[in-house]
């Protein structure tokens, strides 16, 4: 009897250690970002914070979060996004037994698959309420836009995605498709079909970093009587010129 009790305690301890292992680490955190566990407890995510299986990751309206997982895969969450780390198992010595299942509940992300997807693509997938994404060793993006998002950004309410490298397999209640690099899909909530396109849907641009405006070129006009500066005082040269915006 004592031997059975000891065995059960050992198994329970092993399970708890495995369950509490970090599955990834924050590489970059901009703005107010948080992780929420199954008990509803929240903690702030900063650079070098770790994340765990079953947690939900939430970015603020101006937040951005870059996570690197144990198998080398990465996820870049856009502002105002929510991601459930539904299931994740990985051991360096047995990558073929790894599994990664993520659920995008709101907002968007860009991701690069790692060793789990390379060893067995069927064991790595993303889920949304409208579509499930499988991979073929890839880099891709997804965005899930609810009614509030649709009204705010003047785009359809639904889901969109696209491939940068590799390929993805999309599966929806109204059909599926394989997408190669440079290809995109878009599906409106309640639609009976989805759209395939070569152009990046507007939904995928939500939350993109805006490039800094380029400075206007400075044009200097000089008096035509100037001899180009030969034999003149340099200060006199500039006195004969003016800047035109």
Image (tube, rainbow, N blue to C red):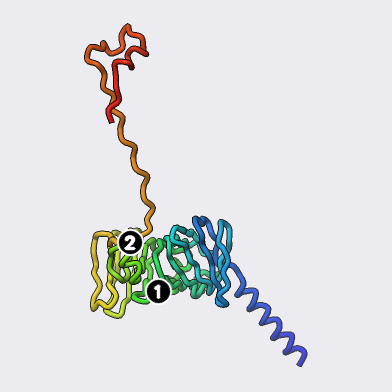
Please identify the quadrant where the C terminus is shown. Answer: top left
Vertical side of 55 occupied by 47: above or below: above
Spatial distance from mark 2 to mark 1, Cα to Cα? 17 Å
Which of discs 2 and 1 lies nearer the camera? The answer is: 2
Name the residue rendered at 28%, 13% in the picture. 228
Name the residue rendered at 62%, 72% in the picture. 20
Instruction: Report x, y in % for residue 185.
Output: 28, 67
Vertical side of 54 occupied by 70: above or below: above
Q: Residue furthest top?
A: 231
**Residue 208 vs residue 194: left or right?**
right
Mark 2 or mark 1, which has the lower sequence index? 1
Name the residue rendered at 30%, 25% in the picture. 243
Q: How would you rate the neighbour count of disc 2 (Cα within 10 Å): few for under 14, some for 14-19, many for 20 or more?
A: many
Q: Front-most of 231 and 52?
A: 231
Q: Residue furthest left?
A: 224
Please identify the quadrant where the N terminus is shown. Answer: bottom right
Q: Is residue 89 visible?
A: no
Q: Residue furthest bottom?
A: 1
Q: Which numbered circle lies on residue 127?
A: 1
Instruction: Report x, y in % for residue 233.
Output: 36, 9
Figure label count: 2
Q: Front-most of 118 and 56?
A: 56
Instruction: Report x, y in % for residue 107.
Output: 39, 66
Vertical side of 5 occupied by 161: above or below: above
Secondary structure beneath label 2? helix
Q: Which numbered circle lies on residue 51?
A: none
Q: Are marks 2 and 1 in contact (CB under 8 Å)?
A: no
Q: Is residue 237 visible?
A: yes
Instruction: Report x, y in % for residue 179.
Output: 29, 66
**Residue 19 vs residue 177: left or right?**
right
Q: How would you rate the neighbour count of disc 1 (Cα within 10 Å): few for under 14, some for 14-19, many for 20 or more?
A: some
Q: Which residue is mark 2?
A: 204
């Amino acid at each position: 009897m004592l031997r059975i009790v000891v065995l059960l305690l050992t198994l329970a301890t092993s399970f708890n250690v495995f369950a509490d292992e970090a599955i990834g680490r924050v590489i970059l955190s901009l703005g107010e970002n948080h992780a929420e566990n199954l008990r509803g407890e929240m903690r702030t995510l900063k650079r070098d914070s770790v994340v765990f299986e079953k947690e939900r990751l939430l970015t603020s309206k101006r937040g951005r979060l870059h996570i690197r997982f144990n198998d080398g895969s990465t996820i870049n969450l856009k502002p105002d996004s929510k991601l459930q780390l539904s299931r994740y198992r990985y051991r360096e010595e047995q990558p073929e037994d790894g599994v990664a299942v993520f659920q995008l509940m709101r907002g968007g992300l860009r991701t690069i698959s790692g060793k789990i997807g390379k060893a067995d693509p069927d064991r790595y997938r993303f889920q949304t309420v409208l579509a499930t994404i499988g991979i073929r060793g890839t880099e891709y993006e997804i965005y899930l836009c609810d009614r509030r998002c649709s009204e705010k950004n003047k785009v359809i309410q639904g889901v969109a995605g696209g491939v940068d490298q590799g390929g993805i397999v999309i599966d929806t209640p109204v059909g599926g498709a394989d997408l190669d690099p440079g290809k995109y899909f878009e599906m409106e909530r309640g639609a009976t079909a989805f759209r395939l396109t070569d152009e990046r849907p507007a939904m995928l641009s939500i939350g993109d970093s805006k490039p800094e405006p380029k400075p206007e070129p400075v044009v200097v006009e000089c008096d035509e009587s100037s001899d180009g500066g030969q034999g003149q005082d340099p200060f006199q040269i500039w006195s004969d010129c003016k800047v035109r915006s």
